[in-house]
Amino acid sequence: MTKSYAPRMHSAEHILNQAMVRKFDCGRCFSAHVNKKKSKCDYHFARALTDDEAKEVEAVVNKAISANLDVTEDMVSIEEASRNFSLTRLPDGVETVRIVRIGDYDSCPCIGEHVDNTSEIGEFHMISQDFNDGVLRIRYKLGDPEERWG
């Protein structure tokens, strides 16, 4: 069975990850379920987010989305990739790594499908977040990219 991708959601996941890294220095999510209707990301964390922190993360993600950033990819050697990224999740025997870049906001190794520009994503809505046993789970959905939002 072929894995079903949701390029808008997957691109939003990258932006959310970078927002969390920049705000909390917590690292990218260690687990994600990306679906067309709603998605979730799990982070190693020490607590739940405050309401203000959740609103700030949502605002930062939406600011990046609304910047109409191009989403590009490069193939680089494993040596070059290892200088800039954690490659612990790569299978053995890989010689080149695909790096997905969202403007100058985020870059990371990835095999998933993405939008061409963040204008295709739509408004990011954090629909819930909770904390259990050292894991912060953030659930989100996206608005229609055709609708203009403030």
Image (tube, grey):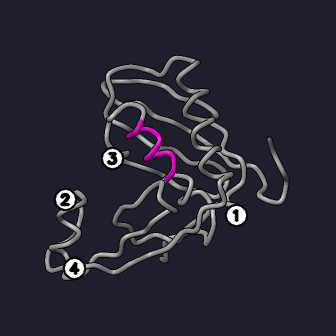
Q: Looking at the image, is mark 4 or mark 3 nearer the viewer?
A: 4
Label 4 or label 3, whichever comes before in sequence order: 3
How far, Cα to Cα, is label 4 from label 1? 30 Å
Q: Which residue is mark 4?
A: 77
Instruction: Point out residue 22 in the picture as x, y percentages from the top left corner.
Output: 40, 38
Secondary-structure class at tag 1: helix
Quadrant of the snapshot with the C terminus: top right
Would you call the spot at circle 4 few (<14 residues within 10 Å), some (14-19), or many (20 or more)? Answer: few
Q: Quadrant of residue 35?
A: bottom right
**Against 138, is 52 above or below?**
above
Label 4 or label 2, whichever comes before in sequence order: 4
Label 3 or label 2, whichever comes before in sequence order: 3
Instruction: Point out residue 129 in the picture as x, y percentages from the top left corner.
Output: 53, 29
Q: Which residues are magenta?
A: 15-22
Name the residue located 61 percent from the left edge and 72 percent from the top edge: 116
Q: Which residue is mark 1?
A: 120
Label 3 or label 1, whichever comes before in sequence order: 3
Q: Which residue is mark 2?
A: 88
Q: Which residue is mark 3?
A: 30
Label 1 or label 2, whichever comes before in sequence order: 2
Q: Is residue 19 left or right of residue 37?
A: left
Secondary-structure class at tag 3: loop
Q: Is residue 118 left or right of residue 101?
A: right
Residue type at tag 3 = Phe
Name the residue located 32 percent from the left edge and 35 percent from the top edge: 26
Q: Looking at the image, is mark 1 or mark 2 nearer the viewer?
A: 1
Label 4 or label 1, whichever comes before in sequence order: 4
Give the residue furthest to the right: 147
Name the residue located 43 percent from the left edge and 68 percent from the top edge: 100
Secondary-structure class at tag 2: loop
